[in-house]
Image (cartoon, helix red, strand yellow):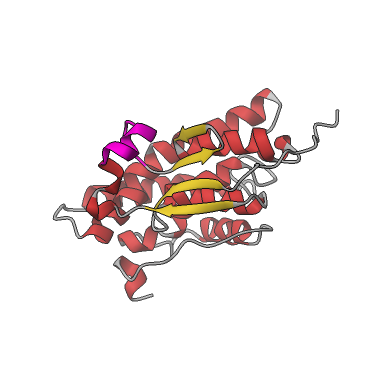
Amino acid sequence: MNTTTTATRPTQPIKLYGTRLSGHVHRVRLFLTMLGLPFEIVELDLRKRDHRTPEFLARNPFGQVPVIEDGELTLADSNAILVYLNERYAPDPARWMPRDAVGAARVQRWFSVAAGPLAYGPAAARILALFGLDTDPAEMVTRSHALLAVMESHLQQQPFLAGATATLADIANYAYVAHAPEGSVSLDAYPHVRDWLARVEALAGFVPMARTPIGLAAVA
């Protein structure tokens, strides 16, 4: 069955609230770009706690980025935003989110990884380095390597996280893996992970996230 639909377009640029240094924000920016949608980034300074102002908390009471405004819709949570953009605007939503039960479940599994092991491993280690927090990163680095070892084994069997082609699973997990060295988590021992990163970077419309001179990235 052909699941391709005629995609609609935003009536005005989608507003993306966040910071260019956030992997959560990057996954939304990346997918917006891949879909060719008009958008504008409303840059927030997290050091100045722009995400804790009453104005921003009215958009997301959890005080987390990203948030999008698409016309009258305000939506938070990067993975939820990916699903919304896909269902609302992708020419072929099944391209990024499979319609069969197993395929959809596989993507959801990697959404859970992005919100769990990835967030509390590579993302957390990078945040410590980025903001110069006085916290021992050892546990986060250990978690990061445990996750990367699982991904390395998994990616020996297939080219993308949820199967033979790229899906929202790859969009959700890319940035913090690619930038793991900024949290002093080396990718040297994970050739299949590095190959996967290269495959994501080769996708049409790919845009990188800004690198910061911290962690292992400072000497790479």
In the image, is 51 to the left or to the right of 202? Answer: left
The answer to whether any part of residue 153 appears in the image is no
87 w.r.t. 168: above or below = above
Which residue, as the protein is rendered here, is positioned at the far top?
101
173 w.r.t. 191: above or below = above
Q: Where is residue 82 in the image (x, y as percent from the top left)?
A: 56, 39
Q: Quadrant of the C terminus?
A: bottom left
Q: Where is residue 96 in the image (x, y as percent from the top left)?
A: 67, 40
- What stretch of residues is rendered in magenta? 53-64
The residue sitting at 38% across, 43% down in the picture is 65
Q: Where is residue 115 in the image (x, y as percent from the top left)?
A: 41, 37
The answer to whether any part of residue 57 appears in the image is yes
102 w.r.t. 78: above or below = above
Which residue, as the protein is rendered here, is positioned at the far right?
1
Which residue, as the protein is rendered here, is positioned at the far bottom?
219
Q: Position of residue 2 (x, y in %)?
A: 85, 32
In the image, is 176 to the left or to the right of 196? Answer: left
Magenta stretch: includes residue 60: yes
Q: In which quarter of the image is the N terminus?
A: top right
